[in-house]
């Protein structure tokens, strides 16, 4: 029997696009993942695609693209250093006659949907092997921590995630700042510190590798 080929990103993506493991496939336009980068500095992990992402097939497009631009400017990072994806790959919806994209509005993914979709994210993290995983909001942080986690308690505090041998940096979801401006200052400070950490990771890789080796 021929040896099994190691999985590559295009194969993973093609399989993801065909996935019908949960009910979200019924109302999605398409499953959404990021644009491949080899060993990116940062893997930004959001909750789930919204209406525009569902239509265009790219995370953080449309209005959310402005949020990403602000993030990159504050952190002094280049777009090609960042890979972006979500915990759940298809848009969670609820019927609404006020929806901008079809007869649906966005909603949070359920625990069951997150669990069913999780093998895709697990493989994605292995394929990308980022230096740093940045969680945006409570859903991705809770995923990493394995239980309900409040971003207000953990934002800006880097920790090590043994499962993927990666540093994790929790942030508020930037969209949350639209509804709660009091978090804006903390968010911007966290993003600037994140940028400094990325530069330190680049300039002092041995230091960070030694820290990782200690954790293993
Ligand atoms: S949300 Fe995930 S598990 Fe559900 S259909 Fe989409 S890709 Fe498959």
Image (cartoon, rainbow, N blue to C red):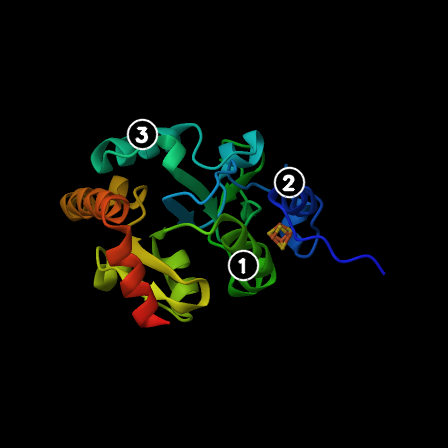
In the rendered image, which quarter contains the C terminus? bottom left
The picture quadrant where one finds residue 166 is bottom left
Residue 10's disc number: 2
Sequence-wise, which precedes: disc 1 or disc 2?
Answer: 2
| Foreground tag (1 vs 2) | 2
The answer to whether any part of residue 100 appears in the image is yes
The picture quadrant where one finds residue 168 is bottom left
Sequence-wise, which precedes: disc 1 or disc 3?
Answer: 3
- SS type, badge 2: helix
Q: Position of residue 64 (x, y in %)?
A: 38, 33
Q: Position of residue 196 (x, y in %)?
A: 19, 44
**Taking 173 as reference, is 153 left or right?**
left
| Foreground tag (1 vs 3) | 1
Sequence-wise, which precedes: disc 2 or disc 3?
Answer: 2
| Foreground tag (2 vs 3) | 2
> Compared with residue 103, is residue 148 higher up or lower down, i.e. above or below?
below
Whole-angstrom CA distance, mark 1 to mark 2, is 16 Å
Q: Position of residue 149 (x, y in %)?
A: 33, 66
Residue 122's disc number: 1
Name the residue at the front extreme. Answer: 206
Tag 1 near tag 3, CB within 8 Å: no
Read off the residue under disc 3: 69
Name the residue at the right extreme. Answer: 1
- SS type, badge 1: helix
In the rendered image, which quarter contains the N terminus? bottom right
Residue at x-position 52% and y-position 60% = 110
**Which class describes the residues within 10 Å of circle 3: few (<14), some (14-19), or many (20+)?**
some
Counting the numbered discs, the total is 3
Residue at x-position 56% and y-position 34% = 57
Mark 3 CB within 8 Å of ligand 1: no
Q: Position of residue 185 (x, y in %)?
A: 14, 44
């Amino acid at each position: 029997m021929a040896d099994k080929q190691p999985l590559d990103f295009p194969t993973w993506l093609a399989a993801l696009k065909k996935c019908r493991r949960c009910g979200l496939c019924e109302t999605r336009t398409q499953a959404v993942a990021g644009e491949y980068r080899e060993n990116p500095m940062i893997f930004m992990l959001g909750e789930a695609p919204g209406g525009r992402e569902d239509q265009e097939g790219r995370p953080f497009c449309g209005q959310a693209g402005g949020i990403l631009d602000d993030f990159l400017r504050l952190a002094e990072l280049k777009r090609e250093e960042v890979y972006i994806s979500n915990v759940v790959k298809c848009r969670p919806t609820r019927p609404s006659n006020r929806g901008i994209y079809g007869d649906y509005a966005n909603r949070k993914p359920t625990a069951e949907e997150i669990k069913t979709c999780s093998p895709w994210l697990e493989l994605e993290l292995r394929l990308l092997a980022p230096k740093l995983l940045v969680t945006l909001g409570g859903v991705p942080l809770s995923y990493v921590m394995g239980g309900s986690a409040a971003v207000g308690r953990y934002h800006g505090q880097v920790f090590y995630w043994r499962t993927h041998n990666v540093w994790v940096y929790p942030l508020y979801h930037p969209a949350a700042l639209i509804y709660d401006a009091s978090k804006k200052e903390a968010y911007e400070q966290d993003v600037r510190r994140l940028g400094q950490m990325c530069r330190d990771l680049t300039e002092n890789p041995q230091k960070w590798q030694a820290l990782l080796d200690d954790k293993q």
